[in-house]
Amino acid sequence: MKKLLTILCGIIIGLSLFVSIGNTAKAAECGCDVTPVLGAEKNKIVANLLSSHEFKNVKHLLKSEGYSYRGAKNIEVLINHSHKDTVMVGVPFYNEDGTIEMAAFFNGIYMGLGSNED
């Protein structure tokens, strides 16, 4: 009887890990035709951006404003097919509070900082 109760409790705990209750957050549809870039192509785009003068100037500017850059690990690369195949790169910088703000580069040109907060 103890084994049956143990197995039953284990199943309940296991199922509770995979089943969630409530509303899940859903992003609003933007209507853009955007695809993520992965693998070697992403690495090439990121390497070109990180070696550019534009990125080095932005990195220096943001560091002087109190932001910190922690490497290329979480850089996101997207291609927006709705706007002439624009290559969009988001580089995470951490502000003084420790929250992430993304520096946006469109075709290698800095467009500004954006956060995930509304």
Image (cartoon, grey):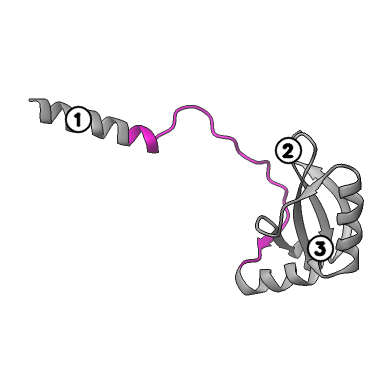
* Residue nearer the viewer, 47 or 33: 47
Hey, what amino acid is under mark 2? Thr
Q: CA distance from mark 1 to mark 3?
A: 54 Å
N-terminal label among 2 and 3: 3
Local crowd size for mark 1, using a 10 Å CA cut-off: few (<14), some (14–19), many (≥20): few
Hey, what amino acid is under mark 1? Leu
Hey, what amino acid is under mark 3? His
* Residue nearer the viewer, 37 or 60: 60
Residue 99: mark in rendering: 2
Residue span colored magenta: 15-38
> Percent x, y for residue 95?
79, 40
Residue 8: mark in rendering: 1
**Rendered position, 73 above or below 96:** below
Q: What residue is shown at x 90% (from left), y 67% (from top)?
A: 53
Q: What residue is shown at x 28% (from left), y 30% (from top)?
A: 12
Question: Magenta: predominant secondary structure element?
Answer: loop
User: Which residue carries the number 3 mark?
Assistant: 83
Q: What residue is shown at x 67% (from left), y 69% (from top)?
A: 42
- In the visual, does 101 lie left or right of 109? left
Residue at far left of view = 1
